[in-house]
Image: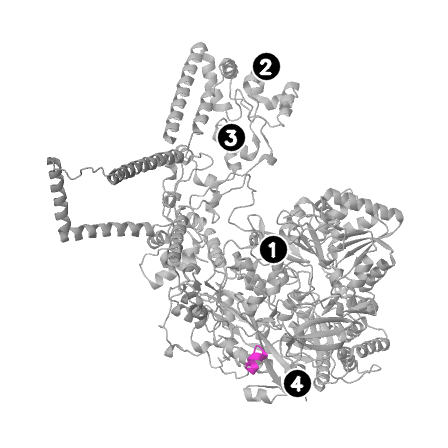
Amino acid sequence: MRNFSLIFKQFSRSVLIIAGFAFWGFSNAYAQADPAKGEAIFKSKCTACHKIDQQLIGPALGPQLTEETDDKYLIQWIQNNQALIAAKNPKALAIYNKFNQAGMTVFTELSDADVTNVIDYVRTEWKTIQSAPKAGAGDGKTAAAETGPSSMVIWGLVAVIIIAFIVILVLNRVVATLERLLLKGKGVVIDAEAEPTAEEVAEAKKKDLIKRILKNKKLVFFIILCGTIAMGSWGWTTLWNTNVHTGYQPVQPIKYSHELHAGTMKIDCQYCHSGAYKSKNASIPSLNVCMNCHKVVKTESPEIHKIYDALGYDPKTQKYDSTAAKPIQWIRVHNLPDLAYFNHSQHVKVGGIKCQTCHGPVQTMKEVYQYSPLTMKWCIQCHKRTEVNGKGNAYYDSILAAHDKIKKGEKVTAAVLGGIECGKCHY
Amino acid sequence: MDSKKKYWKGLEELNRTPEFVEKNKNEFAEPIPIEDVLSGDGLSAKTPRRDFLKALGFGVGAVTLAACQRVPVHKSIPYLIKPEEVTPGVANYYSSSYEGQAILVKTREGRPIKVEGNPNDLFSKGGLSAQAQASVLDLYDVNRLKDPKLKGSEAGWSEIDAFVIKELAAIKAAGKNIRLVTSSINSPSTLAVIAEFIKQYPTAKHVTYDAVSYTGIIQANQNSFGKAVIPHYNFDKADVIVSFGADFLGTWISGEEFTRQYVSNRNNKSLESKKMSRHIQFESGMSLTGTNADNRLAIKPSEEGIAIINLYNAISGTTLPGSKKLSSKAAENAITIAAKELVAAKGKALVVAGSNDVATQVLVNAINSLLGSYGTTIDLDNPSKQYAGNDAEFVEFVNELSRGDVAGVLFLNVNPAYDYFKAKEFTDALAKARLKVSFADHDDETALLSNVIAPNHHYLESWGDANAVEGYYTVIQPTINPVYNTRQAEHSLLVWAENPVKDYYTFVRNTWNESLLAKGGLSGQKGWETLLQTGMIKATPNTAGTYTFNRDLNAVAQTILTHSASIAAGDGKFELQVYQSPAIGDGKRANNPWLQELPDPVSKVTWDNFVAVSVADIKKLKLSEGDVVKVTANGYTVSLPVLAQPGQAQGTISIAVGYGRTNAGPVGDNVGKNAFPFYSFRNGTFQTTATVTAFEVTSIKAPLAQTQTHHSYEGRSVIREAKFTEYKKNPAVHSGNEKGHKNYDEESLWDVPSHDRPVYDWVMAIDLNACTGCGACVVACNAENNIPVVGKDEVRRRREMHWIRIDRYYSYEEKGESITEEYEIDKLKDDAFDNVTVVHQPMLCQHCDHAPCETVCPVLATVHSSEGLNQMAYNRCVGTRYCANNCPYKVRRFNWFNYWNDSRFDNYLNNEHTQLVLNPDVVTRFRGVMEKCSMCVQRIQAGKLKAKIEKRPLKDGEIKMACQQTCSANAIVFGNRNDPNSEVSKALKSERTYYVLEELNVQPGIGYQVKVRNAVELEA
């Protein structure tokens, strides 16, 4: 069902994309050449602070530029708003004050023609947005599809049906037997031992064969041995891996994709997990880190809206309401028991180990799963194999020298420096 | 080895009582009742087949079900908006102050988890008392008031404000009196708030009341020099110190500061320059200070005044009228010797007295004046402001109350319903006032009588400041948002005074901006921020002037003599002395389980107070320890168990105050009995001594939870002691190493050389001459290492969990000869117990290189590290307890219960809220495993990591153990023995260094330095 919803989502997404392309082509056919240039400039220079239909850091440009018809003023403003403000232009001052005196970037490099192109582009875009039917029906549908029954329920139902089926079969057999007994009791003898037919003869032969096989002690012993070994090794690995949760992949409250952020967008791990360099905890980023980008990026996504809801943030007014804030409860993927002390900074900052060494190819994970077993054996193996990264670290100078004196030439691994002693991690 | 002097921890050990012998035969005092279970009905009873199958079926089913849950889901909840300064997993430190002492508060993820000393602190330079260490636990006390209360039921702050303002206005209109009763306040901002309050309500008056008061000293200085102050004492400048009952290393005025000063003339550094101060103590009960004295004389409280008169006579060469000789010849002799030494050390001498009697203190002032102490060892121009209580003022306040003159009373940090000696009179009188406001954060005894309880913040939630000594200003800043719906008392006062500044933070800022910042050369926002970082301002101190005493002493002597006569008891009767124990103090922190379980430094009793009686009197009365006696004095009677206290003056008993709270909370309630009612009020001050009018022996037994003889060495010699005269001739004297350390490796069981220590070899050096035995390290260790509290019953079963303990050893010193053999002890007169000497020895895991515990562990749960640590892997331990059996130092502790999650320990740490105090870097241990000192391995690891991240070698002294950090005496030094220049290497190279039980060749990692006593022979 999950797959179904995914397929549906992808399908609706592609429909939307196709529709969007068609729309784009359609509007392009109508527009003149100027807005196309304007669009390029708009996308490279303006989108950091402006949107056409929505207020971002600056005002929503669609209505703003449509209402303001004095193009000359607009060109002046866009090219050098500071000059206008300095000249105490009343219109300029009004908008400057409205946006908390946040100065707009100066674009003196744009020619008048460039600016006119941009204005044209914005105005046509705004018109088309206003005339176009509201998009988003597709979004609604996908959301509805997501709320369908979970796979657990489906599998549960299937299991119930199968069990019910088995019960019916068994009951049928029981009923049949009882009927026969009843009839027997009434004296109606059903002649079960009639003359053997050819089929029955073949049946008997088969039974004979099985009996002969069962009497072959060597074979039986061999089969039992194989069975024991198989069961034993299965049992051994099961027990050995008790509480080892490699592959653990819980469903998170927000469908955050590391594949997108770390893989496609190539955002550095430290940007969000800033603790990894200085603390024992790599730490899950607080939502203000998300908001650094998502104040602007993907503001319509329902997943991003979960962030907004958690913060009590209203994207329209861009205001935070701390009373409505409620924390997001992520589900921990990598769980070390309390009795083991692990420090990220020791490994990442001092040891220079890549995140992927333990966490696997996170940049390809749509949903994060536990890559390493996180067992003590796994820790120790690495400590035994990894050479200490002491180059350029004055802390290690005397230590490595001291080791060199005792065991010349031997590889100085973490284990050699006491990395497999109990008290290094258990206290 | 070489010292044959007999040391013993308790009389039961000395006399080898059958009970002691029996209990010490086994490692654990109480055997596990395995035999009972095996031989009981449990196994012989027949289990029917069907029952067996049922149990089996249920068991298999339950286990299967329990195993079904694949992964326990752990939630991870990040900050919504992370404060910039917080990094989860990294501790933040904030400077603040505790009772005027600058501290650093360690917080993790926004919650304070430990209090540490500020190395720049004026008093102890980084040391902290046990009480300060334990104060962080009070923050998480679940019994604190969660809301303000109006007439006994919970109310909102607006209701409270409306009610109080209405009442105050009515009182003001009626012209009735308002009294603001507080403990000593030295905070400039709080005093300003009170002034504002009084401005608004002119009938209000500020009354300062201290349960344990120093009015005597303040009044005496007023009488002698016209300065009503407690002077600032400089014990570090004193070569000869004579104390009459002043427990200056423990509870007297500023114990931590005096400890640091005192030890600076007795520690390794001082000894190496062949210098050691002399300390003579005259006292009745054995105090912490008395245990450290070079010569200690047990005298009765009634003779204290006479002794001081005699000392004055001997120094001045005159004879005050009415002078008489002391009953003890040794004491009389000691007075003569003390006088001679004091005069010889003129300008470097100091005489102090613990008495709260004005006349006694005036006479002490006269002696100090003769000795030229003013301007050197006593500083009257930079006085201490730690105590300012005025006893007479408070008594007058109670009188006013009973006359009905006072209509409104506000109590801030005082609890007279518990600690005023005439509590009944006070309670009755208080009923006459119409407005009674308490700022207590607990429903304490006084709060119960109040109609408004406006709970104050804990100090870790507060803004504020302090000025404990002239010119020394410290700031208090909050380290956590208020946990409950409390409000700072100053804020309440500002609101009620309808002050334009309602917010106390702004008020504090204003106070500092106006005058205080400038004293430290700071100003403005920048100055304030600097202050918050440094935590203090030290203004240039005034020059300590010299003062000469020139008042008539005849009347003074007369008052002293009358007073002495009034408390002198006849033959066979007792004189009573009431004192404070260093752990519990005046009882304000009685609800703190860390303090209750901290053994008293002298008696080693936990969770109780008791009647300390001299050994001779115990024998005379045919009492045995734990017998309950009824003591009556000043018309008040308590029943308490007796304790035979060596060193207690014969004919005297001592009882500690601070116990017997009835409304402290579930931890402190009904622990011991209240001794405050034994106080009396004479000549304008509270008196702590009295005549016992009745001493009745009952048939009840109440065994004390005393830790002194737990963990026995089977009589092996572990203490080394030398006289200063011997030390000067040969620094290695009595250390057992006069001819250098003996090499035991020839007959060693272990491989030689044993382990490689290529880089670090973590060791410790403990100077027995610096350790005063105060016990602050024990509480610091509790806080750092999440050590559980076990409660009185479990302590009685010898199951206390402290990783570090202070062993207190008594020994005899008779006629300058130490008693070495047991037959000699038998011949001793009972008087000998008056003259015991004491050595304190901190004992913790010795991290032996050849650790006997490691060889017997069947599961390798305790192993050695390449850094010289004896490590304990709790999750490997299966609880055989072989290691504890095989440990010669008896420092391993077994978890008999799951203390953190067991309803039997509800009062202590078994609740989620209190557990917020846990150090997240150290695990809590489960039932059935061993634990012991880890040498703060979490600190070692953190220190190394910090150096690695900063790419620099580890510096000596960078890593400090929790016990070391809190020690005001700097008795503990920790470091790397592989580094020849480290402090610890230097300390261990001292000739005085010896290793406890060195002869076992377990090669302990902790070296002790011989105790040196600067004693002289007293009886000619």
Residue A67 — which label? 2
Q: Residues within 10 Å of mark 4 (few under 14, many from 20)?
A: some
Query: CB atoms at circles 4 and 3 under 8 Å apart?
Result: no
The residue drawn where x is 46% and y is 54% is B945
Distance CA(mark 1)–CA(mark 3): 42 Å
Q: Is residue B815 above or below residue B153?
A: below
Query: Do we see residue B731 in this rendering?
Result: no
For label 4, the SS is: helix
Amino acid type, residue under disc 4 in the picture: Asp
In 3D space, how far apart are the residues under numbered discs 2 and 1 (Cα atoms)? 61 Å
What colouring style does the render use? one colour
Residue beneath disc 3: A305
B978 or B626, which is in the foreground?
Answer: B626
B566 left or right of B966 in image: right
Residues marked 4 and 2 touching at CB (< 8 Å): no
Is circle 4 on the same chain as circle 1? yes
Q: Amino acid at mark 3?
A: His
Q: Is residue B343 above or below residue A320?
A: below
Whether B676 is among the magenta residues is no
Residue topped by disc 4: B831
The reply to whether callout 4 and callout 1 are in contact (CB within 8 Å) is no
- The amino acid beneath tag 2 is Glu
**Chain letter for the residue marked with disc 2 in the picture:** A
Residue shown at 48%/51% (left/top)? B950
Could you tell me how far apart the alpha carbons at marks 3 and 2 are, in whole angstroms? 30 Å
Determine which residue is flagged by label 1: B104
Whole-percent x, y for residue B880 in the image: 42, 67
Q: Chain of mark 1?
A: B
**Which element is circle 2 on?**
helix
Provide residue B853's location: percent of width, then percent of height: 42, 69
Q: Nearer the viewer, residue B994 or B666?
A: B666
